[in-house]
């Protein structure tokens, strides 16, 4: 919650947000499975103004060998923001934030991936944020799940992600950059709808216990919408339709 701008109207008298959305309305989401021919699996996502590409490689040998695990495979995730992905050029050196988000996404994906099916190997997930506009970790996690599925990695479920939050004392779905900067709370959620399990939950800001519960409910419902789009993207690639 940096740089609050007291003059910005985050929610008008008609319940409309700064980008014209209703409180429970996600941004436009477009997911495409595949696209990178040199990767074993890939996906591209547009989540509002976020644009993110994910490439998956593996399962493949681990170098150096002592990093491997004889009982299970390992998942490695690198989240990277292009210097041109934000208004003011980002320093190309890996930031603390990118290291944190890489770890958070890895831990959110691990419960979904059947790592025990490929011992001694690694699956690498490379996330390139081409354009960022708030909520990149959720968009990246959503696309990474699709890219892993596209790579044929055995999975228990897809992880779908979206953020709930609070602006003008109101719980909202899918927090954009302005709402993240000037709002009261941001709660990214990753959820496996089929298994009904949350694999990512972070909270930046302050919520009452009731608001907390409402944010989780709204976020989980949002994840179900995202999940439908993930499945549609995979259907489109493999069956030439959206699953209709
Ligand atoms: P998330 O993208 O998951 O919401 P943050 O809450 O850390 O993660 O970041 C919110 C937004 O702030 C990002 O989506 C991006 O639009 C913007 N942002 C992040 N890092 C920078 C940066 N170095 N310079 C400018 N804007 C940034």
Image (cartoon, grey):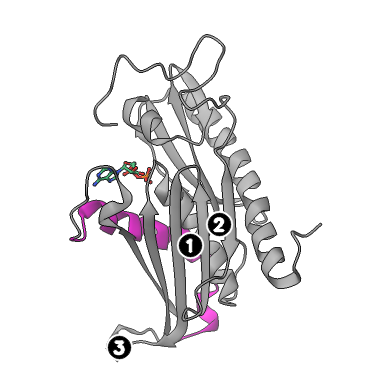
Q: Callout 2 environment at 10 Å: few (<14), some (14 to 19), or many (20+)?
A: many
Q: Residue furthest right?
A: 244
Which quadrant, please, contains the N terminus? Answer: top left
> Residue 86 in the image: x percent, y percent?
30, 46
Q: Which residue is mark 3?
A: 63
Q: CA distance from mark 3 to mark 2?
A: 28 Å
Q: CA distance from mark 1 to mark 3?
A: 22 Å
- Can you tell which mark lies on residue 159? 2
Residue 120 seen by the camera: no
Q: Secondary structure at mark 1?
A: helix
Q: Which residue is mark 1?
A: 109
Who comes first in sequence, dot 2 or dot 1?
A: 1
Residue in the image at 37% along x and 24% along y: 184
Viewer-nearest residue: 108 or 43: 43
Viewer-nearest residue: 58 or 234: 234
> Residue 157 in the image: x percent, y percent?
62, 62
Res 166 quadrant in image = top left
> Residue 46 in the image: x percent, y percent?
51, 51
Q: Callout 3 environment at 10 Å: few (<14), some (14 to 19), or many (20+)?
A: few
Which stretch appears magenta? Answer: 93-119
Asked whether the beta carbons under mark 2 and mark 1 sit within 8 Å of each other, the answer is: yes
């Amino acid at each position: 919650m940096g740089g609050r701008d007291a003059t910005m109207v985050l929610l008008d008298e008609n319940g409309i947000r700064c980008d014209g959305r209703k409180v429970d309305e996600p941004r436009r989401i477009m997911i495409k499975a595949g696209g990178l021919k040199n990767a074993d699996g890939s996906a591209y996502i547009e989540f509002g103004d976020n644009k993110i590409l994910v490439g998956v490689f593996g399962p493949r040998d681990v170098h150096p060998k002592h990093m491997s695990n004889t009982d299970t495979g390992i998942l490695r995730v690198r989240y990277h923001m292009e210097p041109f992905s934000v208004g003011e050029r980002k320093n190309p050196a890996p930031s603390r934030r990118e290291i944190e988000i890489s770890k958070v996404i890895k831990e959110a994906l691990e419960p979904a991936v059947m790592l025990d099916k490929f011992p001694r190997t690694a699956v690498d997930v490379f996330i390139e944020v081409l354009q960022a506009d708030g909520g990149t970790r959720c968009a990246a996690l959503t696309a990474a799940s699709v890219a892993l599925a596209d790579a044929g990695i055995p999975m228990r479920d897809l992880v779908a992600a979206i953020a709930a939050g609070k602006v003008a004392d109101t719980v909202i779905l899918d927090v954009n950059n302005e709402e993240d900067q000037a709002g009261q709370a941001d709660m990214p959620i990753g959820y496996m709808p089929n298994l009904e399990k949350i694999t990512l939950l972070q909270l930046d800001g302050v919520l009452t216990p009731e608001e907390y519960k409402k944010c989780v409910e709204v976020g989980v419902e949002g994840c179900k919408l995202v999940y439908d789009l993930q499945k549609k993207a995979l259907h489109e690639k493999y069956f030439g339709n959206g699953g209709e």
